[in-house]
């Protein structure tokens, strides 16, 4: 055992990790909030977090939230951490709230939804700055530059045919400017025509699984582009058409990340067991459900030290009953939560 491991400030001991589809018992060493290594068992006299009987997994990442819509940002962030969520992608906040910060919760954000004058969501839930109306290509480019300066790494375009929709040249200007600045482009688009508009604009990510059955050629196009799909199945009722869309899109090559659309009606902070169950209904194995909510979601939002339990990664860990590997809804009830190597109650003091 190396000196680094002997000097570790904490060991997570007695648990098991998933390794090539099997469970392997191990002890994880924690130093300065990160995993510094592992061993069969901790050294004598080590400070230990007892994980006996638990399967250890990376803390979850929710790739679609609206923190201020859900409630007080600080309170919602604390609830996310206590529930086993270490990071989020916020896909709709007014510019006045940027940049977004909360103690210990890692937050990536897009800022307001860019939309046409009078477009979604400015006439509904987003009337108070959650939508940013764009009428010209120059205005779109300026808006993206402003959001990037505020720290946004994503730009979100709204396509909803119930309201005026971004002109193609305006949407394309926003997407091109975002790409020039190294940002990813996310699109709110739920039906066929709007998904087509989003793809034509240059979207990299669909903020939701579309709810209208997609034609084969569009599924193929999305898959060939290796676009990301953020699941949000539960928030939209888990309709069979959406579940089948997700199944087909993944089969075609699209990448899928877990997201809940926290702030929408019927959602709550923490891990959403029903969302996980709907992913399983879409053909995801339990391991694939876990990957969608850990490694995949972390990759999408650019958190390279989350989503895995490797040396050098954040010691943000949940411990669940082994039954969760069969009934994925149980993943939403972790018995152990550590964020950067400490219980949420400790990191939130």
Image (spheres, helix red, strand yellow):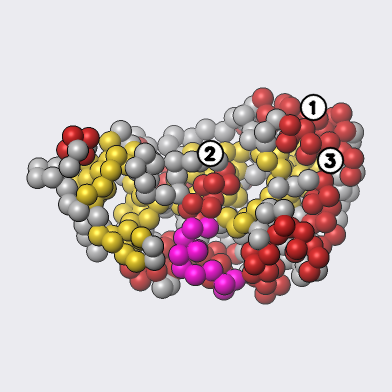
> In the rendering, which numbered label is found on residue 107?
2
Query: Residue 208: x percent and y percent?
Result: 68, 57
Please name whichever residue, 136 or 302, is drawn nearer the observer in this view of the structure. Answer: 302
* Residue 29 in the image, given as x and y percentages of width and height: 25, 43
Q: Magenta stretch: give its range.
A: 281-292
Which one is nearer the viewer's eye here, 212 or 28? 28
Q: Position of residue 337 (x, y in %)?
A: 34, 51
- Of labels 3 and 1, earlier in sequence is 1
Q: Is residue 285 magenta?
A: yes
> Badge 3 is on which residue?
172
Asked if residue 129 shows in the view, the reply is no
- Residue 142, numbered label: 1
Q: Residue at x 50, y 64 (%)?
A: 288
The C terminus - image quarter: top left
Pointer 3 with pointer 1, Cβ within 8 A:
no
Q: Classify mark 1: helix, strand or loop.
A: helix
Q: Quadrant of the N terminus?
A: top left
- Quick check: 262 above or below 301? below
Which residue occupies 35% across, 71% down?
323
**Crowd band around label 1 with a 10 angstrom C-alpha radius: few (<14), some (14–19), many (20+):** some
Q: CA distance from mark 3 to mark 1?
A: 13 Å
How far apart are the two marked residues, 1 and 2, measured between alpha carbons? 24 Å
Seen from the viewer's position, the closer of residues 231 and 35 is 35
Comes first in the chain, label 1 or label 2:
2
């Amino acid at each position: 055992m190396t000196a680094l491991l002997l000097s570790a400030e904490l060991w997570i001991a007695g648990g098991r990790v998933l390794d090539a589809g099997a469970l392997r018992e191990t002890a994880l060493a924690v130093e300065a909030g990160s995993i510094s290594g592992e061993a069969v068992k901790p050294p004598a006299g080590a400070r230990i977090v007892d994980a006996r009987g638990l399967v250890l997994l990376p803390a979850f990442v929710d790739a679609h939230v609206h923190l201020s819509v859900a409630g007080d940002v600080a309170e919602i962030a604390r609830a996310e951490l206590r529930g086993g969520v270490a990071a989020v992608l916020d896909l709709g906040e007014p510019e006045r709230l940027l940049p977004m910060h909360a103690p210990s919760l890692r937050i990536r954000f897009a800022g307001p939804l860019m939309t046409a004058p009078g477009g979604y969501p400015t006439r509904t839930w987003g009337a108070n700055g959650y939508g940013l109306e764009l009428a010209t290509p120059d205005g779109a480019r300026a808006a993206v530059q402003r959001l990037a300066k505020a720290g946004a790494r994503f730009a979100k375009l709204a396509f909803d045919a119930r309201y005026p929709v971004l002109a193609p040249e305006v949407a394309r200007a926003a997407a091109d400017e975002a790409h020039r600045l190294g940002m990813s482009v996310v699109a709110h688009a739920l039906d066929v025509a709007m998904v087509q508009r989003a793809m034509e604009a240059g979207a990299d990510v669909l903020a939701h699984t579309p709810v209208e059955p997609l034609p084969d050629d569009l599924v193929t196009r999305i898959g060939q582009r290796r676009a990301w799909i953020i699941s949000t199945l539960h928030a939209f009722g888990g309709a069979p058409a959406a579940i089948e869309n997700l199944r087909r899109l993944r089969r075609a090559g699209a990448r899928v990340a877990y997201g809940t659309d926290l702030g929408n009606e019927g959602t709550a902070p923490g891990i959403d067991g029903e969302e996980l169950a709907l992913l399983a209904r879409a053909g995801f194995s339990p391991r694939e459900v876990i990957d969608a909510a850990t490694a995949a979601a972390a990759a999408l939002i650019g958190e390279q030290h989350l989503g895995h339990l490797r040396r050098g990664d954040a010691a943000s860990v949940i411990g669940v009953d082994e039954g969760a590997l069969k009934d994925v809804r149980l993943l939403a009830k972790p018995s152990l939560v550590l964020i950067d190597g400490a219980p949420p109650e400790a990191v939130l003091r």
